[in-house]
């Protein structure tokens, strides 16, 4: 017995699940991350911890709220991740003297060493993806995803009344 015969015809006023942009992006993300997960597990690091380390490797230090934004992590999750990374000696934390509620986070030499150790595996995964999908198509995909994000950032926040 299928769903249609059990409840009658399906009459949903929403696009087909197969045309859902959030689902398509999640499916693509999972397919991509499957190429990287084994190397992260080899080095006993989570995807979220890796995101934080990669973001910190590009700068001297960053405020926690800015780090949450650039890594797309909720502040509560980031707090736990930072505690774990700090315990492992992979990051440093410095309180802002003028506002002791704020902290600046930086990557420690041990964190940079971990990135150097994981980098060959990460680059091999990128090379495999580019080889299969095509470098030009990868560049185009990056461009389109950035364009989509930039376009959506110009819209008013969801739930804002239209004028």
Image (cartoon, helix red, strand yellow):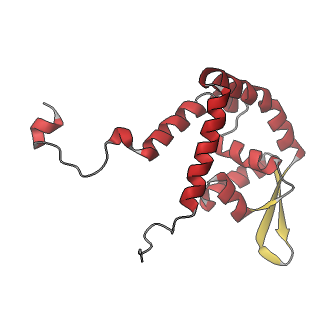
Query: Where residue 160 sits in the image (x, y, percent)?
Result: 45, 73
- Vertical side of 85 occupied by 39: above or below: above
Query: Where residue 103 sits in the image (x, y, percent)?
Result: 78, 66
Any part of residue 79 in sight = no
- Vertical side of 127 occupied by 162: above or below: below
Residue 24 vs residue 145, the one in the foreground: 145
Residue 39 vs residue 57, the one in the foreground: 57
Name the residue at 71% across, 24% down. Answer: 127
Picture quadrant of residue 161: bottom left
- Left or right of 162, for residue 52: right
Quarter holding the N terminus is top left
Name the residue at 50% across, 41% down. Answer: 25
Query: Where residue 34 sits in the image (x, y, percent)?
Result: 58, 29
Picture quadrant of residue 153: bottom right
Quarter holding the C terminus is bottom left
Name the residue at 58% across, 53% down. Answer: 149
């Amino acid at each position: 017995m299928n769903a249609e015969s059990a409840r009658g015809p399906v009459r949903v006023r929403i696009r087909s699940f197969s045309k859902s942009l959030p689902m398509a992006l999640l499916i693509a993300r999972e397919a991509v991350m499957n190429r990287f997960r084994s190397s992260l597990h080899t080095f006993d690091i989570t995807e979220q911890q890796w995101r934080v380390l990669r973001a910190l490797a590009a700068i001297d230090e960053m405020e926690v709220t800015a780090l949450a934004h650039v890594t797309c992590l909720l502040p509560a999750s980031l707090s736990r991740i930072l505690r774990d990374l700090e315990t492992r000696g992979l990051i440093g934390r410095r309180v802002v003297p003028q506002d002791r509620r704020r902290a600046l986070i930086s990557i420690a030499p041990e964190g940079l060493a971990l990135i150097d150790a994981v980098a060959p595996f990460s680059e091999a995964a990128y090379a495999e993806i580019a080889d299969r999908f095509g470098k030009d198509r990868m560049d185009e995909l990056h461009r389109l995803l950035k364009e989509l994000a930039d376009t959506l950032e110009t819209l008013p926040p969801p739930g804002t009344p239209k004028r």
